[in-house]
Image (spheres, grey):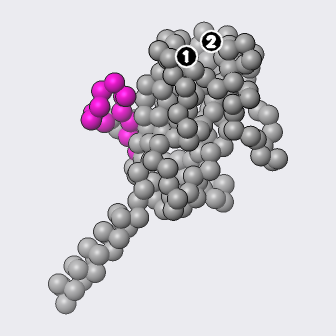
Amino acid sequence: MKRKLIIVLLFSIFSKLAAITPLIIYRPENDHPMNEVRCYIQIFDENNNDVTYSCGNAFYSWANIPGRYHAYKKRYYLTGGMAFHINILPGKYKISVYTPKDEHYDINTENKEAWNSNTFEYDSDNPINVIFVAPTVNDNQFYNGGWTIHYKAPKFYKFTKPYTPDQLPPKKKDEKDK
């Protein structure tokens, strides 16, 4: 009886572990002042419940120090060169990032309010392994106070080349300019 119970319990644990999907959210490096600006990660389920801290185990690493992982102490965030790793539970999620208006530091942008990203829809049944976060710029290549999340890596020359307005993912009808 105990043996059957142990087998059923182990099977249950392994089946749940097999369903977990690893996801990396990577923020490549930019120039120095922009690298220091944190963007905070938000994850919502398909019912718009905030599941940022309950959808899986998360930790971070630095791209230039492979194989070394660190636990977050409080909030999930990214700075330039950081990768957010999460073993996400099965489901459909809406992922976004933001920077509060009091944490822009010395970056002079058109947007003096909170910097927000687009909403990236992620489905663990049809997963992508890595998604990218990058700051947005205006037509003149100056930071304009926003973020974008995309499944394609941004172009790179010494630093990440931010997305221009014509390269941003299209907004949905219900998504207003923030």
Rendered image quadrant of residue 8: bottom left
Do the residues bearing badges 2 and 1 touch, measured as CB atoms within 8 Å? yes
Question: At which x and y percent is residue 43?
Answer: 57, 47
Instruction: State how far apart marks 2 and 1 are (Cα).
Output: 7 Å
Vertical relation: 117 (above or below) 17: above
Residue 35 shows in the view: no
Query: 6 above or below 71?
Result: below
Left or right of 7? Residue 166 is right
Residue 43 seen from this side? yes
Secondary structure under the numbered disc 2 in the rendered image: loop
The residue lying toward the viewer, choosing from 54 and 65, is: 65
Quarter of the figure with the C terminus = top right
* Crowd rating for badge 1 (residues with CA inside 10 Å; few <14, some 14–19, many 20+): some
* Residue drawn 60% across the image and 9% down it: 106
Q: In this view, does 142 lie to the left or right of 173?
A: left
Earlier sequence position, callout 2 versus callout 1: 1
Secondary structure, mark 1, is helix
Residue at the image point whose x is 27% and y is 35% from the top:
67
Q: Callout 2, which amino acid?
A: Ile
**Residue 107 — which label?**
2
Q: Residue drawn 47% across and 34% down?
A: 26
Region rendered in magenta: 58-69
Residue drawn at the location 64% of the way across and 26% of the way down: 163
**Residue 71 placement (x, y as % from top left):** 35, 38
Q: In this rendering, would 13 be left or right of 39?
A: left
Pinpoint residue 99: horizontal percent, then vertical percent: 61, 27
Q: In this view, does 124 lie above or below 150?
A: below
- The residue indicated by pointer 1 is 34
Quadrant in the picture for the N terminus:
bottom left
Q: Which of 55 and 18 is in front in this view?
A: 18
How many C-alpha atoms fall within 10 Å of the one at disc 2: few (<14), some, or many (≥20)? some
Q: Residue furthest left?
A: 3
